[in-house]
Amino acid sequence: MDLENTENFENSAEEEMKAKGDKKAHFNKEVNEKDGRKKFFKKKVCYFCKNNIDVLDYKDIKLLKRYVKDSGKIIPKRLNGTCSKHQRLVTKAIKRARNIALLPYETRY
């Protein structure tokens, strides 16, 4: 009986390894099928957290222009990498600067 149990155990272990191998191949699709290149993403870090900037001034146009597109739209946080807290401060500062005509509103062509 011990011999039968060990054979069954080895067979079940081999089946599990095959199943895991299939899952691994399925989840490790990093290669783009068209190009054959791997995709690597660099994690974005909040500029304000990195430099310990807590106060954002609406008169600092040079800094605020980094967070505005050419068309005048505010760049979302998923694209520029700011954290939620600082994105709210940036948005508020940009809106204040627009209100006193330091930055343009959206321009449509």
Image (cartoon, helix red, strand yellow):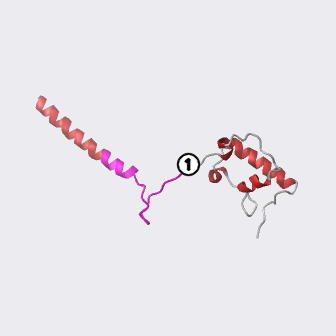
For the point 81% across and 58% down, the residue is 103
Magenta span has 11? no
The residue lying furthest to the right in this view is 100
Q: Residues within 10 Å of mark 1 (few under 14, many from 20)?
A: few
**For this rendering, which residue is in front, 85 or 52?**
52
For the point 16% across and 32% down, the residue is 5
Q: Amino acid at mark 1?
A: Lys
Circle 1 residue: 43
Where is residue 78? Give x, y as percent: 62, 51
Is disc 1 placed on a helix, strand or loop? loop
Which region shows up in magenta? 20-42
Q: Quadrant of residue 4?
A: top left
For the point 69% across and 55% down, the residue is 75
Where is residue 7? Give x, y as percent: 15, 36
Q: Is residue 45 left or right of residue 75?
A: left
The residue lying furthest to the top in this view is 2
**Placement of 72 over or under 12, stated as above or below:** below
**For this rendering, which residue is in front, 48 or 94?**
48
Where is residue 60? Give x, y as percent: 80, 51
Q: Quadrant of the N terminus?
A: top left
Magenta span has 28? yes
Q: Is residue 8 left or right of residue 88?
A: left
**For this rendering, which residue is in front, 59 or 91?**
59
**Placement of 56 over or under 108, stated as above or below:** above
Q: Quadrant of residue 2?
A: top left
For the point 59% across and 49% down, the residue is 44
Q: Is residue 24 left or right of residue 109?
A: left
Q: Quadrant of the C terminus?
A: bottom right
